[in-house]
Image (spheres, grey):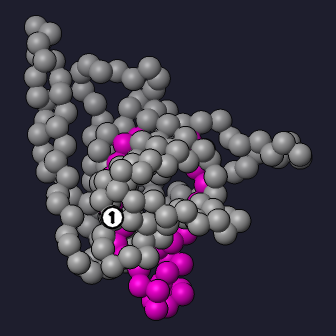
Amino acid sequence: MAELPPVRRIVTDHSPDGKAIIGQDQILTPANPLDPSGGPPPPNSLVPGFTSIFRTDGHPASAQGPWTDPHGQMQNLVSNEGVVCRIVDFPPVPKDAPRELRDQVNIFHRTTSVDYGVVLDGELDLVLDDGVRTTVGRGDVVVQRGTNHLWQNNTKENCRVFFVLVPAKPIKVETTGELLKPTNTKHLEETKEES
């Protein structure tokens, strides 16, 4: 199985006199989304690696001055305040893996967001809650509009997807008026000390 290369993040900035500069050039490491310390997924595990690239605060976003670095921080899948950008590395999940293990890494979830997912390398399946399965591969783009879904890598190779998540209004069921709630992902949020 081919290993995916490390993610290099380059963030531009401005000098005090307004000239364009490179503000940061750094190699980032994927984090285990279930590890509160932000550590990497265990070697040879089925847990996807989340590499947080950038998060804006508000709309319109500020393109000047200090910014909050989401890398290495526990955080929710989506920010209600701004746009989230991350790379997710999906390891292969063998078809003969125990169901309870498959269910831990392949969970149905809904976010209150519009997500753009660009497959950078590999292949995986997008599965909707009605069982519809669509295979996406390198170069394919998925626009996820608040649907309940899961991702499954049923190949023998790693798959890397670049996601941009934009906060959205909740989905309203036309026939009943019910607002569909996002999946509870509080376990992924940053732990904040109470003051």
Is 136 above or below relative to 65? below
Q: In the rendered view of the protein, which quadrant contains the C terminus?
A: top left
Count of numbered circles on the image? 1
* Residue 193, visible in the rendered structure: no
Q: In which quarter of the image is the N terminus?
A: bottom left
Closest to the observer, 141 or 194 = 141
Position in image of residue 135 (x %, y %) = 49, 64
Badge 1 marks a residue whose secondary structure is loop
Reply above or below: 42 against 71.
Answer: below
64 left or right of 118?
left
92 is within the stretch colored magenta: yes
Choose between 75 and 140: the one closer to the eye. 140
Q: In this rendering, does residue 66 appear at all? A: yes
Q: How crowded is mark 1: few (under 14 residues within 10 Å), some or many (20 or more)?
A: many
Q: From which residue to which does the magenta span run?
A: 84-113
Instruction: Say which residue appears at 61% left-offset and 54% top-offset.
Output: 110
The residue at the far top in this view is: 17
Residue 138 lies, in percent from the top left, at 34, 56
What's the amino acid at mark 1?
A: Gly
Q: Mark 1 points at which residue?
A: 122
Residue at 48 percent across and 70 percent down: it is: 152
Name the residue nearer the viewer: 185 or 134.
134
Q: Nearer the viewer, residue 119 or 48?
A: 119
Q: In this view, does 12 lie to the left or right of 82?
A: left
